RNA sequence: GGAGAGGUGGCCGAGCGGUCGAAGGCGGGGGCUUGCUAAGCCUUUUCUCAGGUUAAAAGCCUGAGACGAGGGUUCAAAUCCCUCCCUCUCCGCCA
């Protein structure tokens, strides 16, 4: 959520440019401005009336001490009260409506973010690694995994539905090997481990920006009013909810493994084969709380962390700077890291690393007390480090052999106790 | 799920119908002191919204609101009543 000062003067112009660059129409901001004006009118009216009432009340208490008659004043106060009641009700409706629309306004992109309409205008920053060559036609991961009996797509469908899979035997072991390797890596890089709840309440979903805009993307348990986490970013954001941190406590680095649950509403028919897009997947998430002035340095450092992780697994990747039109709702600047998969013959997004500045901390009310005593919202950053499915695809496809086996990347061998899956 | 206790400013903790945005302490800021040993003394210190002042911001001024959340009683609520949420203790249930 943005500061309300974006509704005035120069900042309003900035906000309008931001919305345009993100591909939003004018309707939203017009609606917000209209409601803001109405809201201010009501605030003024209500405040004035309340001031009047407070004055009368004060008079009553003063006279009462002297034992004088106050029945006239009480009558007057009652009348003001009637009027006030009506105004306050109307004001509340307007304010709620205003804040609802205001919370649909996305973050302002950082000045270093390229302006563009969609993913075609993202900027490739750098690439690493050689694309493996084969003297046979490489197969897609689902064929290899099915044949080796390490992923059961059929069973996933039977047990839960499409876009769910069952990892079996060495498949499950490989999955855990990846998760544990990611965890170990994050720990080495100075992040502290968290195991958060996998179900969270509405406020927590609001804090990270998932609600109210993306309600349909989430699994919701009506009976208990809880949501399944779509990413560990959600509970991690709320780790310091309603808190004021000391400057000396920052930066804080956290990581958490969680399964991630996404309805993938609107993705029907897209990426249906394999494990590229699923309703449930595993991810280790990196998260930072930083001082505002340090967040962009910390952002670059987080990208570097993930790059090192991919290098250690010898997975070819490229770093992509998302343009304004492709960036997520809460983000001010996002790098995607895409891994190359020979079976798909394309780069797949395996990590998304964002600096959301104070967009989430404002919602979650997380501040830092500066040396001068002033309180300021902290900046938060999040990045996948990493999500398993796309990494798994890359490993299966890039390390396949002619016989349909998978050569296990060196760092994972100690977990599996073998070099090759056959 | 049942019984009880409680939720107050960065923290601890008073207040239990009007003069309370809230005593006191700790912590933080500023200053003074430096013969009674990283001490003492003085002073200051919540946030949000609206309006005014301003080129604008800061600051300042005016008003409103906030003592877990939401309702209610009352001219007036941190203080009384109701509902919900959370924390703690005990009991029950349970991996």
Image (cartoon, rainbow, N blue to C red):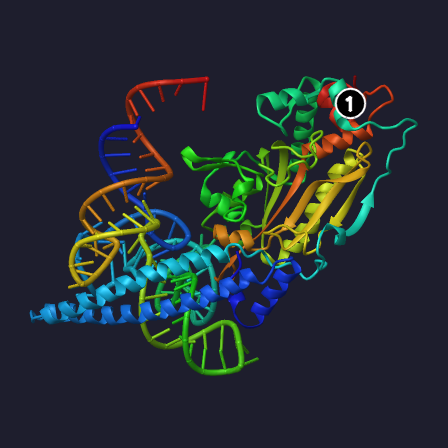
x and y, in percent, of residue A261 in the image: 57, 34
**Depth check: B23 or A264 in front?**
A264
**Depth check: B3 or A374 in front?**
B3
Q: Residues within 10 Å of mark 1 (few under 14, many from 20)?
A: many
Left or right, A355 with respect to A37, comes to right
Left or right, A218 with respect to A189, comes to left
Q: Is residue A303 visible?
A: yes
Left or right, A400 with respect to B33, comes to right
Left or right, B25 with respect to A179, comes to left
Q: Is residue A372 visible?
A: no
Residue depicted at x 45% and y 57%: A99
Secondary structure beneath label 1: helix
Farthest residue to the front: give it.
A269
Query: Where the C terminus of chain A falls, by quadrant?
Result: top right
**Depth check: B71 or B68 in front?**
B71
B71 is higher (above) or lower (below) than A162: below
A175 is higher (above) or lower (below) than A216: above
Quadrant position of residue A222 = top left
Q: Which residue is mark 1?
A: A144
Quadrant position of residue A57 = bottom left
Residue depicted at x 56% and y 68%: A12
Residue depicted at x 56% and y 55%: A358
A247 is higher (above) or lower (below) than A83: above
Farthest residue to the right: give it.
A135
**Chain letter of the residue carrying label 1:** A
x and y, in percent, of residue A60 in the image: 15, 69
Residue depicted at x 93% and y 27%: A135
Number of numbered discs on residues: 1
x and y, in percent, of residue A183 in the image: 65, 33
């Amino acid at each position: 959520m943005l500061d309300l000062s974006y509704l005035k003067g120069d900042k309003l112009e900035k906000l309008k440019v931001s919305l345009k660059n993100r591909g939003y129409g004018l309707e939203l901001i017009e609606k917000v401005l209209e409601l803001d004006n109405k809201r201010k009118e009501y605030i003024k009216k209500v405040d004035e009336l309340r001031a009047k009432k407070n004055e009368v009340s004060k008079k009553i208490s003063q006279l009462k001490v002297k034992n004088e008659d106050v029945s006239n004043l009480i009558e007057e106060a009652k009348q003001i009260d009637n009027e006030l009641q009506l105004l306050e009700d109307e004001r509340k409706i307007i304010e709620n409506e205003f804040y609802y629309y205001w919370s649909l306004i996305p973050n302002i992109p950082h000045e270093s973010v390229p302006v563009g309409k969609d993913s075609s205008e993202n900027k490739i920053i750098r690439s690493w690694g050689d694309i493996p060559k084969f003297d046979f036609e490489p197969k897609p991961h689902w064929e290899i995994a099915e044949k080796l009996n390490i992923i059961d797509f059929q069973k996933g469908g039977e047990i839960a539905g499409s876009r769910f899979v069952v990892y079996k035997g060495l498949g499950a072991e490989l999955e855990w090997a990846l998760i544990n390797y990611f965890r170990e890596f994050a720990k080495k890089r100075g992040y502290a481990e968290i195991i958060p709840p996998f179900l969270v309440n509405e406020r927590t979903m609001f804090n990270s920006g998932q609600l109210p805009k993306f309600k349909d993307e989430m699994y919701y348990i009506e009976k208990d009013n809880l949501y399944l986490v779509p990413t560990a970013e959600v509970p991690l954001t709320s780790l310091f909810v309603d808190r004021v941190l000391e400057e000396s406590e920052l930066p804080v680095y956290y990581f958490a493994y969680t399964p991630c649950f996404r309805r993938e509403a609107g993705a029907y028919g897209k990426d249906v084969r394999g494990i590229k897009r699923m309703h449930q997947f595993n991810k280790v998430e990196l998260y930072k709380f930083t001082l505002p002035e340090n967040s962009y340095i910390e952002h670059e450092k987080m990208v570097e962390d993930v790059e090192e992780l991919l290098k250690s697994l010898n997975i070819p990747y490229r770093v992509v700077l998302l343009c304004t039109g492709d960036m997520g709702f809460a983000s001010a600047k996002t790098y995607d890291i895409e891994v190359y998969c020979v079976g798909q013959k394309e780069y797949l997004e395996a990590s998304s690393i964002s600096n959301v500045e104070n967009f989430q901390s404002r919602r979650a009310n997380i501040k830092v007390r500066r040396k001068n005593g002033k309180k300021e919202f902290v900046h938060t950053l999040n990045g996948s480090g990493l999500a398993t499915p796309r990494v798994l695809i890359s490993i299966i496809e890039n390390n396949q052999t002619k016989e349909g086996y998978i050569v296990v990347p060196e760092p994972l061998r100690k977990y599996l106790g073998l070099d090759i899956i056959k």
